[in-house]
Each structure stands twice: as structure tokens, then as C-alpha cells.
């Protein structure tokens, strides 16, 4: 089955138009939700087709070079700026993840009544910008989506956020914008050396002088690393998460952090092949430090959302570790694991933030010390919490394990017994999750809790989908891993 | 000899005496004398323009002269060429504008009306002779004719203390400066006595004599020449009110009847310039190293002092007086750059002198217009002070508009006449290179500075709200004079091409002869 | 049949101005006269643009050398080498369209002006005339005339319809920019007397002849001549632009000016400086421009960064926008300093974009003043409930101004930076700093104004009226359209930028 319609453009266009429609339609809350969900399903289906086209031999997409469903059109022809979009295994998976999480986030926030039309329109708009980053193959276009993505998230926090939302929103905006400047400088450097904004050309020809690559690598590392985020440029994340509404947190942790990882792989790995080893060691050191530091900080958190936020930092460190192991030792498993970890963490962190949001909403507090013994009274909440915590701490059979395991295999291959340092974080992770779980849902019921509802259908549904996917990709990782591994191998 | 080219001067003289004679028999309260003076000057102006190259008399079949006229009368010590014709135009325009303005301004002085217009005609005649003469001594005499006429005019309101004081002050200063100038003339004359040509008062022969003397023909001649130059600069510097010989000007302009202030600033001052051009660019040009730099420095000081002092004035007549001083500074640039003709760079010198002449001509429109506006507001009982001008655009909209145009032109804002003349003037200084460039730099910066006080008047007229906003009845004749002056400023901007050609021809006449 | 479109663009506003001045004192017809005149000029400028881009047979007069889209020439003062030469090309066309557009919208925005209406609208139209004249003149003398003429209507606009401190602001504006102009005048003299003969075209003010000759001999007279004269021009243009440290007239002028005046001032007047820099500074002094790129770059970067920092400390909305204008005009200098096609084109495009954006911003400040009677940011808080349309436009325009991708400001800033990498290398991060500071002050301000707690002291406030909304939405449409699809304007600019770049690059 060959599919050669403008599939990627449609994935971008439909939510874009959808967001305008949703904003303008004078519907009540439920009507808006139904329309939004319906609109978001279209890009989800399309991106699923896209994913199938990349990973399955049975669905054929037009392939040009390394990329599928490539589209290119003149935009500012005078300066060689084009509208070029296409996907490979790396981006197809992330596009699918993004469209999936957007749909789930829309459903999950069924009850959001404050300025509901703007809220849903922003979610769809956010989908455009995130998918746009993943599919862009022109630096100008890439940066356009990259920067534009700040806006909906900024509004999401600033309008629908918690009590300290203004501080968090501005901090988020400025931090990530500062990081964008490094990316922007990088794009200019590429243009100076390569004379083009085409990412494909840059990847193929490697025009940059070797001497300039190391400096640029570090600049981009901090540019993308802020988004990832890595320690020490992570401080915006906990604030942003704590204040953001649940749907915002889901997308922030689930996909926006992946933009950083994607950028690291697309730019640092693919376009700067001549960097010195010390640059990758730097990536590894920062990655491991993020892992360990993030994990230890988690031990001290009382706010469930804050804990999950720090755990995200810790888990994204694994991505960096994988990249580092690939860069130094050429371990394919490490990089493949890193990419898979992005996907896995996307699913898991989405579930975690949904649970935290639902507890905050249904119980009235997210502080672990104020919870306790809620399992009997809120069985669905507790059940999903257990599944998600276990997936996050890397229980075999669930998706997180596969990712971490492959990264560690690669790491061991390259660094040998140094692996014990990152392994510490795994132990600590298990500790804080189990500890938190035990205090929050087991034990005697905390009588101070006044109101307590269990999850409603619109909370259960997305979490069920996510839980099923934990298992599917935990048990059948090869569905994606084959293509990822082949992609890494082709990278050389 | 075709003495008919002297007809403009003769006609004016005839009208001047005719007015007096008619006055003996007709004690009319009407405005006959003004109309007579006006008729004389307009006829004269038409003839002058005809001589300058329009030549419609020959088109009409009259064979009076070959235009453009260029004739010399050695026995009369006179010449009529483009330079003198240019100044004829300048003086006649000033005379005409002021005379029109005077029709309604001089109501109170009806008793001496005939003398007023007669003296004005004589003053114009004197200045025309200054521009025409080829002889140093005739130049002095002609200038005295103008001076004595204007002393009387300045003190014309003899019951008015300010006017009488102005006249007295003007007379004393004028007499002293004339004496100084005469001393300078005698020193120069003395130097020429030692040259082969013998003693001479002819302007171009003086030039040759000085050239001979300075080339080593006479020993120890430097000091007398420098002294003579300084005395002449001081003597005629009083007449054109350059710093530091400017003190009298604001007081006299303020005290005199405003139309006479207009005539002094727009007319007689230009006569001083005619003398200055004749003296320094013809007679003394050979001694340019002795006085060139001094004139340059005086030019800069004059503009700066004039402009800075104008800023602090609140009396409009004083402000315009200081602005007049500053304008004299600009015109001196032409004299500095004009000395290049002596080195053979006639093109640059001609451009500079043309710029200076153009500025003189356009300044006539601007300055007489501005003074006449003040005369108008004074006559209309609005006042002569800056504060009286608040909200003037509601009270007399067209006058306010005219004043705005005149002031902007004085500041050198394009596309008005004042911009064109300054443009040519400053550009010639840049073209000359060397230290002349600094004259241009100071010139443009001063121009920018002057905008401040000109615009302040506009601010009072248009932006500030006056207490009384009722319409004011405007005296017709002054109104006409102001509009004519404004039209002159606008048209000299639009018709710059023929004016510049005329000024260039005049400059050529001066430097070539 | 050849039609003198360019002269018509001067004639139509001139007639409109005179007619509106001649109307009776309190006539309300002046705005119609002026609006119609501005719209006719706008249509003419569109005709010229499209006829140029798509080669429509509209009877454009073309110049012999073919480097101008339209060209009209007549003798004026041949004795001194002055002629009446008008011409438009990729550099001037976008700015001319912008001029007519902003003036027309400024008139619509001020529709309810009741204080001396006929003078107000007439002066706006006079601005239109003189600014268009500056952008079209190809004779230095004519150029200077229009350049100076601009001062007069602007002085009155500030002085008569301005805020409480208008007298000071108006005279400061006038004297400051006039000093810049007269210094430039000396440069014009130098071109006339020295450059012309050295380039074998004689004493002439004709910029086309001078520029074409300079193209053949870009190093004429050497640095000894080019450097000081270039600096004189640079100073003249820099004051207008304005660049730090010659910028202090701008915030005062803006704060006091009426809204339409501010729109024209920031949207168009500042562009005259940039335009002159390209048309005269870079074109006539290739050697000096090439050698002294660091001068442009330094002033550009200092303006960008310094003004952005100053913005952080502003409490008056209009002052904030005024300083942000200084910061954004620094991009133009930076782009010019790059001497690369993309940088030069970016600088020119930045002028166009800044014109659109800043017009919106000043109109918004005007709405705030009209509706809330204050421009103090600390008092204008939480407007989103009471003024949703205002808040929406505020947000979009702030984003456009801080360079958000998808809106037009980004494209030009991107191009400028892309061009500057060659000269700056890794130090490009210094000018990039300006962007983050810009982001900071805009986000901070927007946050307070839109999302803060509503300031109840404001009392009853209204949202946009029809005549406010119309110009704002038209401008907004342009901002978004050119953000997503800048190619039409860039296509217009690029040939000019490429020509200039090859002239400058051909020396190295």
C-alpha cells in the first residue's frame, strides 16, 4: 500500500485549522471537548500510519534518501529557505508519541472549564508546534516551530496554572528562550559553513570545519540540554510543572522534553560527526550527574508533582548517557536505547502527571505526607499509580525497563565497570517510588483527608490506554526497536 | 555714451525732489507721497530688470540699451554691470516693500510724510551709487548719502523718546564709524602714492598698486596695509553690524519705527555689503593675506554671538536684530571664499560670491517681511513682544502663516529661498577646502542653532493658546507688503535657477572687473 | 502611454494637504480629503509595485540603466547641477507602500480627533508627502529638501497635539534631528564638489550618476576622503535612526506625540535614517563602508543591547515601545554591517517589519491612553477581561516585536543574524543577548497587563472602537502574513541587496 499524499503537512495543518475552529466555535464545554477530541484523532491516525510506514514493511510511504514522506516547497527561495518536512525512524516515533499524548491530554482534561475554548485551542496549537519540530528538515522551519512552541506552553502555565503561575511562566519562557539563542547561533554557524539551511544537506555533507565543531557541540548541548533538561540548567522545570495544569504537565514532560533529546541527536550527533571524544564524555558526565542528582532530590520531595518532575530530569539523563556511550564507543544499543527511552519516558511521565493531577484534583492535596491509605477508597487511582510507578522505576515487562536495560548494556560495553555510578540512580529511583507509594496509598487512612473521589471515566480512559501501551511495548519492544536499531546502524 | 542706463538712479532722484516740491503746494492728508515714491521705485525696478537681461524694452521696439548692460563711465566714476544691477534689485525691492508697508504704518506722522518717502528714495539712491561706483572716495560719499538719510529716518518719530534715542545713537555710531573708515581710506590712498601708478582712489587701480607694493615694490608696507584693512573692516563693520561692532544695531532697530528697522536691516545693511564687496574683493583683494583670516574669524564670531544672543530675546525686534547680525556672519563667508579669485580659482570664488549675493537678495525678502509683520502686529495693537504672539494663528491666520514661512526661510529650511542661498554659500566654502571648510561647519551648526529661536516664535503663534482669540483687523498696506515678501521667499525657492544665474553673473562682474 | 506615477505620489498628497488647510476652521471634511488622498497614493504605490514585480504594462517610466522600477527626471537648476529625479527600486518600494499604508491607517485611527482637525489631518498628509519624497528622491538636493521638510509637520504634530511636556519634546526633536541633517549636508557638499569630479561625472547632485560611477571605481579618492564623509552621513542618518548615544530625542518625542504622530515617527521617520544609510552611506562610500563595518556593527549592537536593558526599567508603555524601537533599529545597522546579501536584505526587511509592528504597538498605547486614561504599566493590569480584543492584539504584537517565529519580525532578525555570523563568529551571542532581554521585558509587561489582577481603579473601561480595530487588524494581518510568507517582500528587496553586497564584497 503506497501512500503519497501530503501526510505530514496534513498532520500539521489539521490541528492548526482545528485550533482556530475550536477557538471560534461558540460551544459549551462538552461540545468543545468532543470537537477537539475528534480533530485530534485525525493527526493521531495519520501519524500512526506514518509510524507504520516507517517501521512496517507492509505500509509503504514514499522514501527519499533517509527520509519518508518527504515534502519540499519554496518558501523564501532568495535565501534558500524551504518548507521541507519528512520523517525517519527517530522522528516518526516521536511524532506518534506527540499526537497520542495530545489526544489523551485533551480527554484527560475533560472537566477543565476555565476558558475552555482557548484551552483546547492551545492544546491543538501546541500539537502543531511540537510535531513541527520533529518533522522539520529545514533549519529555519525547525527554529520557527521550536520557538513558536514556547507560546502555547507559556499561556498554558500563565492562564491555567497554580498559585505561583506568573513566576513559573516567565521563568519557563526566559530560560528556554535563552537556550534557543544558542540553538539559533548554531543555525547561523551551520549556515555560515554550509551556506544552506537544509538539514538534509548538512547531515550528508558535514560542511563544518572540524575545529569549529567542538565549540558548537557544547553550545548546542546547552541549548538543547536546557530543554531536556539537564542539571544544572534544569531549575525551570520543577517550577513549570508544579504550576502547570495537568494537561500542560503531560505535554511538557511527555513531549516537550523530548524536543531537547531529539535536537541533541539530530544536531549534535548527526550534523557534528567530527567532534572530539571529550565532548561526548561531557555529555555522559552531565547525563549521569542528572540521573543521580535528580534521583536523590526526589527522595526529599513531598509534592508528588515535584517528585515526578525531578524524576523526569533523572530519566532524561539516561538519554544523555546513551548518546555519550554511542559517541565514545559506537555502541548501537546505547543510542537505540536512548531513543527508546525518550518514547518510554513520554508514555510513563504522561501517566505519572495524570495521576498526580488527578490526586491533586480529587483529594485536594498532592503532598505525600498528607495522603495515606487511599488505596481502599480510591482503587482506580491507586492501581494506576502502582502501574505507573513500577513502569517508571524500571520493572521488567514494562516499557521503561527495556529502554534503561539497552542503554545500560551499551554503557557497560563502552565504560565497563563505571556503570555502577548510573546504576546507583536506579536503586535510588526504586527507593523513592516505593517509599512514596507506600506512604501515599497503603497504610492507615489519613483521617485529615476531607474529600476523596476516585477517578472518573475521562481520567481512567487515557490512563488505561497508557498502561496498555506500557505492557505492549514492554513485552514486544522489537515493534519499535528493530527500526530504531536499524536507524542507528545506518548512522554509522 | 548711453547715459540712459543711469535712468533708474535719475528717476529716483527726480521723484525724491518731486515729492518735496509737491509737498510745498499740496498739504494733502492722503497717501499721495507714498504712491509717488512707490511709482518711482517700481519704474526704476522695471528698468533695472530690463537691463539685467529680460530686455522687454527692445522687444517693444525701444533701442535703449543692449541687455545685459555692462557699461562704464570713467568720468562719472560709475559703472553699470551685473553686480551693480543685482544690488539695484536688492535695494529697490527693500525700498518697495518698506514703502508699501509704510503706507499704513506712517499714519501718525502725516505731517512729515513727504520727507519720510523722499529720504527713503535718497537712501536708496545712495546705496545704488555705492554698488555702482568704481572709486573709493565716491563710494564713501555715496554711503554717507545713505547714512544721513537713514539717521533722519531712524529719529523720525521725534516725539517718541525711543525713536529719538535710536536716531541719536545711530548718528553718533555712524559718524564715528565713518571717521574710522575715512582714516582707513586715507591710509590706503597714502600707500598707493608710492607706487608707479601714483596716488589713486580707483578701486581696481588700488588693487594693482597694493599688489605691486606687497610683491616687494615698497619696503615696510605690511603694517600700513594691515592697519588700513583693520580700520576699513571696523568702519564698514559698524555699518553692517558685525561683531564686535554690532552694539548699536539692536537698540536702533528696537527704537526706530518698525518700517525703518525693516529698511535698515533689509536695505541699508545691504548697502554696507555692497561696499564691503567692492572694497575687499576689488580694492583690497591683493592684501587678502593681511585681512582674510581676520574676516573669517569675525564671520564665525558674528554668527555665534548673533545667534546665541537672539535666543535670549523676548522682544521680536531685538530678536530679529540679532538674527540680522548672525546673517551678516554668513554673508562674510562669501567674502572670505571670494578671495580665492586672487589665486586664480575664479570658479570657487564666483560661486561663493554668488551665494553671498543670493543670500543678500533673499534676506531682503525674509528680513523686511519679518519686520513688517512686527510692524503689522504693532499697528493692529497686538504688540511687538513674543508673549503678544500667543495664539496669533487664530487672530490673524494668514499673517501667522506668512511669518512662519519667513522664519523658516531665515532658519534655512528647504524648499524656501533662505535654504537655497545658504546652500550655495556653505557649499562654496566646502568646495574651497582648507580652513574654509570650518566656516561651512560653523555655518551649518549655527543654522541649526538659529532654528531654535525662530521656531520659538512659531510655537507662540501656533501652539500656545492666547488669552484673546478674537480676529484682528489687519492694516491693508502692511498686509500686502507682508504677503509680497512671503511670495518672494517662496518664489525665490521655486525659481532658483534664474536667480542663481543672475547672482553668478553679478559675481562674475565683480570679480572679473 | 507613460504615466508619471511617482510625481503623482507627491502631487496627490500635496493637493490633499492644501485642500484640507483651505477648509473652514472647524470643518470635519478634512479627514475625508486626507484619507482619500492617502488611499489614492497607496493604490498608486501598489500599482507601481505590482507592475514592477509582474511586469504589468501600466506605463511605468523606466530608467536607461534598468536598475529602477520607475524613474522620472527633469531639469531643475542646471546651473548648479540639480535636477528633479525620482526613482524607486527594491529598497524604496516596500518603504513607500508602508508610508502610505501607515498614514492612511493613522488617519483612520485618529478619526475622532476634534482639536484643530483640519490642521491635524493636513499635517499627517504632509508627512506622507515628504517621507515619500525622501524615499523616492535620487537627487541629493531634492533628497535633502524632503528630508528637512519632514521636520516641520512632525514638529507641529508633537507641539500642538502632544502631551503635557510637548514643548520641550517638540523642540528637542527638531534641533536634534536638524543638527544631524546639517552635518549630512556638509557630506552632500563633499560629494558634489569632490566625488563628482573624481568619478568623472562632474559637479552633480544626481545620485544615480554618482552611484553608477562609484560602482565602477569603488575605491575612488581613497579612505582619506571616504572615511570622514561617510562618517558625516552616518552621523546624520544615525541621529534619525536613532542609534545610541544620539537617541535621547526619541523617547521624549514619542511620549509626548499624539498616537498618529508616534506611528508615523517610529514607523516611518526612523526608516529614513536606515534608508539613507543604504541608499547613500553604503552605496556612495563602498570602501569606507567595507573598512568601517565595525563602526556600524558597534553602534548597532550597542543600540540593540543598551536600549533593550533600558526597556526593562520603563513604566510608561509608550516609553517602553520607544526604547524598543531603538533596539530594533540596531538590527538594521547590524544587517548593514554584514555586507552580505542576506544581512543587508534582512536589515531592509527589518525596517519594513518594524514599521508594521511598531505602528500596532503605538496604536495600542494610544488606545490604552484613550480608554484607561493612563499609560502607566503598573496601573494597566489584568485587562484581558474588560478589553479582550486589545489584549489579543497586544499579545500578538508583543510576540511579533520580540521576534517570535511565524510573525514577521522574526524573519528579518533571523536574516540579519545569519548575515552577521561571518563577521562576529561566536561573539554573535552578544547581539543575540538583546533578543533575550527583549523577550524578558515584553513577556513581563504583557504578563502584568494581560494576566495580572484587574486594577479596579481604572473603573469603567472600553475595548477597541471600530476605527481603532480596523487599522489594528489590517496591520495584524500583514504581520502574520509576512511572518509566514515573507517571500514577496524579500523577492523585492533581494536584487537590491545582492547588488549592494557584490559592490561591497567586490573590494575584499
Image (cartoon, rainbow, N blue to C red):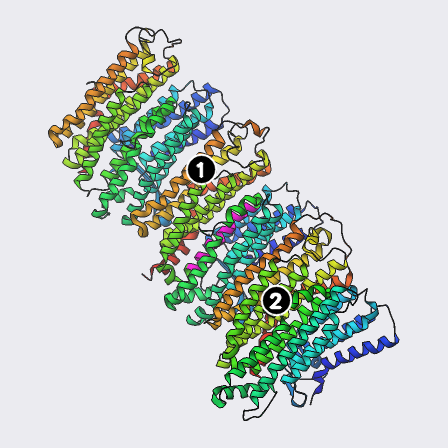
Q: How crowded is mark 1: few (under 14 residues within 10 Å), some or many (20 or more)?
A: many
Q: Nearer the viewer, residue A336 or C309?
A: C309
A94 lies left or right of B513: left
Q: Position of residue A378 (x, y in %)?
A: 34, 9
Magenta-drawn segment: C261-281
A101 lies left or right of C189: left
Q: Which of A281 and B442 is in front in this view?
A: B442
Q: Position of residue C413 (x, y in %)?
A: 39, 45
Q: Main secondary structure of the magenta part?
A: helix
The residue that disc 2 covers is B325
Q: Where is residue A53 in the image (x, y as percent from the top left)?
A: 27, 30
Could you tell me if residue A10 is visible in this image?
no
Q: Residues within 10 Å of mark 2 (few under 14, many from 20)?
A: many
The image quadrant of residue B3 is bottom right
Q: Answer whether residue C280 is magenta in the image.
A: yes
Q: Nearer the viewer, mark 1 or mark 2?
A: 2
Amino acid at each position: 500500500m503506497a501512500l503519497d499524499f501530503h501526510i505530514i503537512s496534513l498532520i500539521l495543518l489539521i490541528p492548526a485549522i482545528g485550533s482556530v475552529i475550536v477557538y471560534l466555535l461558540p460551544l459549551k464545554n462538552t461540545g468543545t471537548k468532543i470537537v477537539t477530541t475528534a480533530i485530534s484523532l485525525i493527526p493521531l491516525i495519520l501519524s500512526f500510519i506514518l509510524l507504520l510506514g516507517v517501521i512496517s514493511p507492509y505500509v509503504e510511504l514514499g522514501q527519499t534518501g533517509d527520509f519518508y514522506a518527504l515534502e519540499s516547497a519554496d518558501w523564501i527561495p532568495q535565501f534558500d529557505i524551504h518548507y521541507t518536512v519528512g520523517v525517519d525512524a527517530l522522528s516518526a516515533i516521536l511524532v506518534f508519541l506527540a499526537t497520542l499524548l495530545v489526544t489523551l491530554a485533551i480527554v484527560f482534561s475533560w472537566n477543565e472549564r476555565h476558558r475552555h475554548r482557548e484551552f483546547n485551542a492551545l492544546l491543538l496549537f501546541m500539537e502543531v508546534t511540537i510535531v513541527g519540530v520533529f518533522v522539520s528538515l529545514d533549519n529555519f522551519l525547525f527554529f520557527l516551530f521550536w520557538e513558536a512552541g514556547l507560546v502555547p506552553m507559556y499561556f498554558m502555565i500563565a492562564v491555567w496554572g497554580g498559585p505561583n503561575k506568573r513566576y513559573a511562566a516567565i521563568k519557563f519562557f526566559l530560560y528556554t528562550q535563552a537556550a534557543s539563542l544558542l540553538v539559533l547561533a548554531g543555525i547561523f554557524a551551520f549556515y555560515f559553513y554550509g551556506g544552506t539551511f537544509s538539514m538534509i544537506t548538512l547531515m550528508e555533507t558535514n560542511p563544518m570545519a572540524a575545529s569549529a565543531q567542538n565549540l558548537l557541540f557544547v553550545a548546542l548541548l546547552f541549548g538543547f540540554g536546557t530543554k531536556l533538561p539537564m542539571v544544572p540548567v534544569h531549575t525551570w522545570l520543577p517550577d513549570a510543572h508544579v504550576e502547570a495544569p495537568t494537561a500542560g504537565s503531560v505535554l511538557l514532560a511527555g513531549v516537550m522534553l523530548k524536543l531537547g533529546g531529539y535536537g541533541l541527536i539530530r544536531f549534535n550527533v548527526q550534523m557534528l560527526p567530527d567532534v572530539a571524544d571529550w565532548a561526548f564524555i561531557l555529555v555522559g558526565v552531565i547525563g549521569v550527574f542528572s540521573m543521580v542528582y535528580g534521583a536523590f532530590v526526589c527522595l526529599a520531595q513531598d509534592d508528588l508533582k515535584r517528585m515526578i518532575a525531578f524524576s523526569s530530569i533523572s530519566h532524561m539523563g539516561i538519554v544523555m548517557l546513551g548518546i555519550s556511550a554511542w559517541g565514545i564507543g559506537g555502541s548501537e544499543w546505547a543510542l537505540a536505547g536512548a531513543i527508546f527511552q525518550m518514547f518510554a519516558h513520554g508514555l510513563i511521565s504522561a501517566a505519572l502527571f495524570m495521576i498526580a493531577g488527578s490526586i491533586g484534583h480529587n483529594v485536594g492535596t498532592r503532598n505525600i505526607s498528607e495522603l495515606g491509605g487511599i488505596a481502599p477508597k480510591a482503587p482506580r487511582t491507586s492501581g494506576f499509580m502502582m502501574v505507573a510507578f513500577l513502569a517508571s522505576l524500571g520493572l521488567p515487562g514494562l516499557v521503561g525497563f527495556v529502554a534503561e536495560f539497552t542503554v545500560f548494556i551499551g554503557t557497560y560495553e563502552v565504560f565497563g565497570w563505571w556503570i555502577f555510578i548510573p546504576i546507583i540512580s536506579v536503586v535510588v529511583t526504586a527507593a523513592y517510588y516505593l517509599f512514596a507509594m507506600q506512604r501515599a496509598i497503603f497504610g492507615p487512612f489519613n483521617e485529615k483527608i476531607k474529600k476523596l473521589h476516585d477517578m472518573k471515566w475521562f481520567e481512567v480512559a487515557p490512563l488505561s490506554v497508557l498502561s496498555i501501551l506500557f505492557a505492549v511495548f514492554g513485552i514486544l519492544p522489537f515493534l519499535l526497536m528493530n527500526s530504531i536499531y536499524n536507524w542507528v546502524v545506518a548512522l554509522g | 555714451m548711453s547715459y540712459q542706463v543711469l535712468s533708474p538712479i535719475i528717476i529716483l532722484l527726480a521723484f525724491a525732489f518731486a515729492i518735496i516740491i509737491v509737498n510745498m503746494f499740496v498739504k494733502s492728508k492722503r497717501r499721495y507721497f507714498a504712491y509717488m515714491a512707490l511709482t518711482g521705485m517700481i519704474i526704476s525696478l522695471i528698468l533695472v530688470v530690463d537691463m539685467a537681461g529680460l530686455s522687454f524694452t527692445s522687444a517693444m521696439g525701444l533701442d535703449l540699451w543692449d541687455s545685459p548692460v555692462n557699461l562704464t563711465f570713467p568720468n562719472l566714476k560709475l559703472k553699470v554691470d551685473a553686480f551693480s544691477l543685482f544690488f539695484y534689485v536688492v535695494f529697490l525691492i527693500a525700498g518697495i516693500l518698506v514703502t508699501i508697508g509704510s503706507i499704513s504704518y506712517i499714519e501718525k506722522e502725516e505731517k512729515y510724510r513727504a520727507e519720510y518717502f523722499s529720504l527713503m528714495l535718497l537712501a536708496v539712491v545712495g546705496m545704488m551709487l555705492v554698488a555702482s561706483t568704481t572709486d573709493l572716495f565716491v563710494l564713501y560719499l555715496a554711503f554717507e548719502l545713505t547714512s544721513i538719510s537713514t539717521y533722519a529716518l531712524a529719529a523720525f518719530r521725534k516725539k517718541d523718546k525711543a525713536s529719538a534715542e535710536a536716531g541719536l545713537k545711530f548718528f553718533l555710531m555712524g559718524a564715528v564709524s565713518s571717521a574710522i573708515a575715512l582714516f582707513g581710506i586715507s591710509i590706503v590712498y597714502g600707500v598707493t602714492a608710492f607706487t608707479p601708478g601714483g596716488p589713486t582712489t580707483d578701486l581696481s587701480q588700488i588693487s594693482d598698486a597694493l599688489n605691486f607694493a606687497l610683491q616687494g615694490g615698497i619696503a615696510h608696507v605690511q603694517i600700513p596695509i594691515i592697519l588700513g584693512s583693520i580700520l576699513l573692516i571696523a568702519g564698514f563693520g559698524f555699518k553692517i553690524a558685525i561683531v564686535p561692532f554690532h552694539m548699536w544695531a539692536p537698540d536702533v532697530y528696537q527704537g526706530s519705527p518698525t518700517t525703518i528697522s525693516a529698511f535698515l536691516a533689509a536695505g541699508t545693511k545691504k548697502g554696507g555689503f555692497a561696499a564691503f564687496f567692492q572694497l575687499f574683493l576689488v580694492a583690497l583683494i591683493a592684501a587678502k593675506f593681511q585681512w582674510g583670516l581676520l574676516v573669517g574669524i569675525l564671520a564665525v564670531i558674528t554668527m555665534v554671538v548673533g545667534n546665541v544672543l537672539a535666543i535670549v530675546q523676548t522682544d521680536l525686534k531685538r530678536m530679529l536684530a540679532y538674527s540680522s547680525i548672525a546673517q551678516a556672519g554668513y554673508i562674510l563667508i562669501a567674502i572670505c571664499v571670494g578671495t580665492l579669485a586672487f589665486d586664480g580659482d575664479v570658479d570657487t570664488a564666483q560661486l561663493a560670491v554668488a551665494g553671498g549675493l543670493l543670500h543678500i537678495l533673499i534676506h531682503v525678502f525674509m528680513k523686511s517681511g519679518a519686520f513688517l509683520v512686527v510692524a503689522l502686529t504693532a499697528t493692529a495693537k497686538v504688540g511687538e513682544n513674543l508673549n503678544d504672539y500667543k495664539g496669533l494663528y487664530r487672530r490673524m491666520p494668514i499673517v501667522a502663516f506668512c511669518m512662519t514661512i519667513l522664519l523658516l526661510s531665515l532658519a534655512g529650511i528647504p524648499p524656501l529661498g533662505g535654504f537655497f542661498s545658504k546652500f550655495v554659500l556653505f557649499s562654496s566654502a566646502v568646495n574651497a577646502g582648507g580652513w574654509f571648510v570650518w566656516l561651512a561647519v560653523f555655518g551649518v551648526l549655527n543654522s541649526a542653532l538659529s532654528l531654535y529661536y525662530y521656531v520659538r516664535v512659531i510655537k507662540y503663534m501656533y501652539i500656545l493658546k492666547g488669552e484673546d482669540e478674537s480676529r484682528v483687523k489687519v492694516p491693508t498696506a502692511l498686509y500686502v507688503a507682508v504677503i509680497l515678501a512671503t511670495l518672494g521667499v517662496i518664489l525665490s525657492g521655486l525659481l532658483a535657477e534664474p536667480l542663481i544665474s543672475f547672482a553668478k553673473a553679478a559675481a562674475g562682474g565683480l570679480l572679473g572687473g | 502611454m507613460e504615466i508619471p506615477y511617482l510625481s503623482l505620489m507627491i502631487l496627490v498628497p500635496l493637493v490633499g494637504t492644501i485642500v484640507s488647510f483651505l477648509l473652514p476652521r472647524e470643518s470635519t471634511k478634512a479627514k475625508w480629503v486626507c484619507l482619500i488622498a492617502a488611499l489614492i497614493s497607496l493604490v498608486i504605490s501598489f500599482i507601481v509595485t505590482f507592475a514592477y514585480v509582474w511586469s504589468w504594462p501600466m506605463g511605468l517610466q523606466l530608467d536607461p540603466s534598468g536598475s529602477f522600477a520607475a524613474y522620472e527626471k527633469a531639469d531643475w537648476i542646471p546651473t548648479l547641477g540639480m535636477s528633479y529625479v525620482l526613482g524607486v527600486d527594491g529598497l524604496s518600494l516596500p518603504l513607500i507602500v508602508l508610508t502610505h499604508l501607515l498614514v492612511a491607517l493613522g488617519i483612520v485611527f485618529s478619526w475622532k480627533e476634534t482639536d484643530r482637525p483640519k490642521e491635524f489631518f493636513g499635517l499627517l498628509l504632509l508627512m506622507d508627502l515628504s517621507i515619500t519624497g525622501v524615499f523616492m528622491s535620487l537627487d541629493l538636493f531634492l533628497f535633502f529638501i524632503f528630508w528637512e521638510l519632514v521636520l516641520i509637520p512632525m514638529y507641529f504634530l508633537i507641539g500642538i497635539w502632544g502631551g503635557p511636556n510637548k514643548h520641550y519634546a517638540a523642540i528637542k526633536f527638531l534641533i536634534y534631528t536638524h543638527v544631524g541633517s546639517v552635518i549630512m549636508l556638509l557630506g552632500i557638499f563633499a560629494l558634489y564638489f569632490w566625488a563628482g569630479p573624481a568619478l568623472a561625472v562632474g559637479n552633480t547632485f544626481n545620485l544615480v550618476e554618482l552611484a553608477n560611477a562609484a560602482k565602477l571605481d569603488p575605491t575612488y579618492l581613497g579612505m582619506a576622503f571616504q572615511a570622514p564623509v561617510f562618517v558625516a552621513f552616518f552621523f546624520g542618518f544615525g541621529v534619525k535612526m536613532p542609534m545610541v548615544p544620539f537617541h535621547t530625542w526619541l523617547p521624549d518625542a514619542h511620549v509626548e506625540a499624539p498616537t498618529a504622530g508616534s506611528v508615523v515617527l517610529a514607523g516611518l521617520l526612523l526608516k529614513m535614517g536606515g534608508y539613507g544609510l543604504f541608499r547613500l552611506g553604503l552605496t556612495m562610500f563602498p570602501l569606507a563602508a567595507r573598512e568601517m563595518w565595525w563602526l556600524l556593527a558597534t553602534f548597532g549592537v550597542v543600540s540593540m543591547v543598551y536600549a533593550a536593558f533600558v526597556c526593562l526599567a520603563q513604566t510608561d508603555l509608550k516609553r517602553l515601545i520607544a526604547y524598543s524601537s531603538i533596539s530594533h533599529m540596531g538590527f538594521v545597522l547590524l544587517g548593514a554591517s554584514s555586507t552580505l546579501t542576506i544581512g543587508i536584505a534582512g536589515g531592509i526587511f527589518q525596517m519594513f517589519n518594524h514599521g508594521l509592528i511598531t505602528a500596532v504597538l503605538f496604536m495600542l498605547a494610544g488606545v490604552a491612553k484613550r480608554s484607561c486614561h493612563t499609560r502607566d504599566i503598573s496601573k494597566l493590569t489584568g485587562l484581558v477581561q474588560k478589553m479582550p480584543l486589545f489584549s489579543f492584539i497586544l499579545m500578538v504584537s508583543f510576540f511579533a516585536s520580540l521576534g517570535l517565529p511565524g510573525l514577521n519580525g522574526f524573519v528579518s532578525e533571523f536574516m540579519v543574524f545569519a548575515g552577521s555570523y561571518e563577521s562576529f563568529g561566536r561573539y554573535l551571542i552578544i547581539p543575540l543577548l538583546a533578543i533575550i532581554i527583549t523577550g524578558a521585558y515584553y513577556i513581563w509587561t504583557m504578563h502584568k497587563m494581560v494576566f495580572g489582577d484587574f486594577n479596579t481603579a481604572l473603573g469603567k473601561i472600553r475595548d477597541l472602537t471600530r476605527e481603532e480595530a480596523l487599522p489594528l487588524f489590517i496591520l495584524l494581518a500583514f504581520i502574520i502574513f509576512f511572518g509566514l510568507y515573507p517571500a514577496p517582500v524579500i523577492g523585492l528587496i533581494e536584487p537590491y541587496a545582492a547588488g549592494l553586497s557584490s559592490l561591497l564584497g567586490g573590494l575584499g
